[in-house]
Amino acid sequence: MADDDRTPQVRALLQQYLHSWLQVHQAEVDPADQWVEVQRGLVIYVCFFKGADKELLHKMVNTLLNVKLNETENGKHVSILDLPGDILIIPQATLGGRVKGRNMQYHSNSGKEEGLELYSQFVTLCEKELAANSKYAEAGVVVEHGTYGNRQVLKLDTNGPYTFN
Amino acid sequence: MADDDRTPQVRALLQQYLHSWLQVHQAEVDPADQWVEVQRGLVIYVCFFKGADKELLHKMVNTLLNVKLNETENGKHVSILDLPGDILIIPQATLGGRVKGRNMQYHSNSGKEEGLELYSQFVTLCEKELAANSKYAEAGVVVEHGTYGNRQVLKLDTNGPYTFN
């Protein structure tokens, strides 16, 4: 979804993990409330570009949830739906960065309102797809997600990260 | 270095962190020996593609070490050399993956021998550049790197990951 296309609409980066913690709110009020914890699964970092079409969200969710990249105990690769495992979605604007001299530029990133709208719809669509999958729903696995616009403070334990974009 | 070019030679992914641990050997002999620990700095995940030219390594190292993407205490962005911070280099073959249907393909990745050679030279070049930088050398910061071909078991604490490719 990224570099096959001259004008990418979205960039997603996946990272397999064993255990992860994400700070979903700044520690203003109740520090105990500020972290979500997820068990073995997949982090989806996502960044939308200017002019991204909502139509792409269905295809994107379908690809991300069905691609076989999670390793089972016996070394077989299965989708996150088939693992089944938790999912942690993180809005990651820096994925849209380009190096210009010594600086980073983010001219192609979607604007805040547009980005928030796309991000929210992406999260909702993931949640719906997962809720509709009986195996996934029965396993009691969860979907958690970062707060758009927040600093994404993350702790990650991996068993060999499976990173691609 | 990736999607500006129709035939990329390398893909690098950078992630800012506060504290990180990498298992550099499998736990065969001495479990105490198997982890390296790095303080605040930058993870560089790297994957070379078939036909990558060694000539690109200098430009690559220069870019990665000088791009201003590390955040200081007061929110300013500086290079890893200027921070200065530790560097953790991780060979990450999965960065070269492409989604084909529900499967991942790695047809463009460099072969094992070629990849090991490029990776080793990349690590050596980073170490040389950093040793030659007096500010960096004086600060006592370190460069650590994963073992090519190993499973890269990683623990990462971030303060807002700065991920781009």
Image: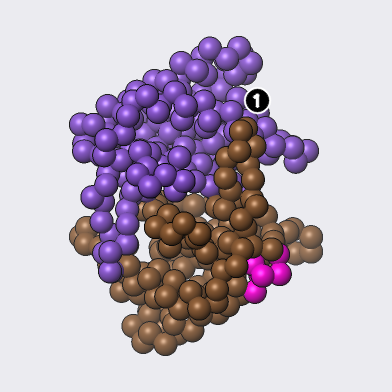
Chain colours: A purple, B brown
Range drawn in magenta: B112-117
Q: Is there any visible trace of residue A31 in the rendered image?
A: no
Against B21, is A126 above or below? above
Name the magenta segment's main secondary structure: helix
Against A139, is A61 above or below? below
Tell me the crowding category of disc 1: few under 14, some 14 to 19, or many 20 or more residues within 10 angstroms, Cα based. some
Chain label for disc 1:
A
Residue A59: horizontal and vertical position, in percent? 47, 27
Q: Is there any visible trace of residue A104 in the rendered image?
A: yes
Q: Which residue is rendered at x = 31% and y = 45% of the image?
A: A93
**Residue A133 found in image quarter:** top right
Badge 1 marks a residue whose secondary structure is loop
- Is B7 or B69 nearer to us in this picture? B7
B12 on left or right of B96? left
Question: Disc 1 marks which residue?
Answer: A82
Assess whether residue B76 is covered by the magenta stretch.
no
Residue A161: horizontal and vertical position, in percent? 58, 48
Assess whether residue B113 is covered by the magenta stretch.
yes
B77 on left or right of A61? left
Q: Which residue is rendered at x = 53% and y = 12% of the image?
A: A132
Q: Which residue is rendered at x = 58% and y = 48% of the image?
A: B97
Residue B99: horizontal and vertical position, in percent? 57, 40
Q: Which residue is rendered at x = 78% and y = 38% of the image?
A: A74
Name the amino acid, label 1. Asp
A87 on left or right of A11? right
